[in-house]
Amino acid sequence: MTVGVPEHEVFAAADAVLARGERPTVERVRQELGRGSPARVGSLLDDWWKHLAARMKGETRLPELPGQVAQAFVTIWQQAINLALGVAEQTLDEQRRVLDTERDRIASVEDQAQKDSAKFRQHAAEAVAGRQLVETRLADLELLLEQRQTQIDDLHQQRDSLQRQRDEAQKQSHQLQQDLQALQQKAEQERATQETYVRGVEDRAHREVDRAREETKDGARKNKELVQQLDQLQLRLNTKLEELTQAQQQAAVQQARADTLDSQLQRFNKPAAPTKSRTKKTSGR
């Protein structure tokens, strides 16, 4: 399993940076390598600084040189070591600050991740609760749909029943119309007959009265008989008038029956009002 850039490559890059007269830092070493994470390079750079002193001491083992030259070289080399150690200490401080900053950033990221995780868990719980609510609502709607379908089927049955009743009422209405027309024709015929009969009676009565009046002119001796005949005629006229009154009453009865049949016909011809009320009652149930 790969853990990052190798140690020897980081050490070589740090040596190259130092050879250019620059202080080896995490960013400079990473630029020299062209890769590597700051944490990995910073950790290996700490190890490079630790080994730098030992490496520099090893370089003091010089070949046989004149005493003054060797001493001068050692003095310069020690100064270089001290300078390098100061630079290394500064670099270590910088690396520590970078590591502290990185640790703070990582802690902040972890804290934000924990907050996001808690928020996601809350959202997930809300989503589950919302799904359960939707499923419950869906079940309620399915039950309501079944109830509505049952009511629709019931209304269809009621509609078919009302249509059959309407057809039967139309048949009865047609029959009542025929009966009404027959009664109207019969009443009209009876009225015409009664009127003809009454006119005939009145004409005969008038003729007899006129004839009796003419006969009274023949002499006073027939006066008493004429008076009696007039009384009889008057009696007969009254009788005929009573018959006329009865005939008119019968005609009125026939007309009342005709009006009753006409009212029944109009009631059957009206729209079936119970459909609405019964539908409302069914919907309420």
Image: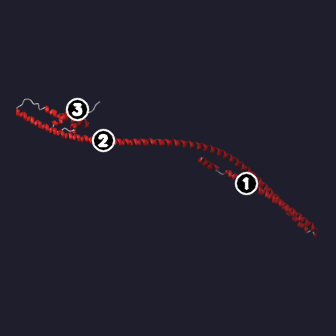
- Amino acid type at mark 3: Glu
Give neighbour class at mark 2: few <14, some 14-19, many 20+ (Cα, 10 Å).
few
> Disc 3 vs disc 1: Cβ atoms closer than 8 Å?
no
Q: Residue at x 61, y 43 (%)?
A: 154
Task: In the rendered view, tell whether residue 258 sits above or below residue 116.
Answer: below
Left/right of residue 272 with respect to residue 73 in the rendered view? right
For mark 2, what is the residue? 107
Task: Please tell me which residue lies in front, 277 or 210.
Answer: 277
> Disc 2 vs disc 3: Cβ atoms closer than 8 Å?
no
User: Is there any visible trace of residue 253 in the rendered image?
Assistant: yes
Q: Residue at x 23, y 36 (%)?
A: 43
Residue 190 in percent (x, y) is at 79, 55
Residue ranking furthest to the right: 221
Q: Earlier in the sequence, mark 2 or mark 3?
A: 3
| Residue 221: quarter of image | bottom right
The N terminus lies in quadrant: top left
For mark 1, what is the residue? 260
Left/right of residue 138 with respect to residue 59 in the rendered view? right
* C-alpha separation, residue under disc 1 versus residue under disc 2: 101 Å
Residue 40 in percent (x, y) is at 25, 35
Q: Quick one: SS at disc 1?
A: helix
- Amino acid type at mark 2: Ala
Residue 168 in percent (x, y) is at 68, 46
For mark 3, what is the residue? 7
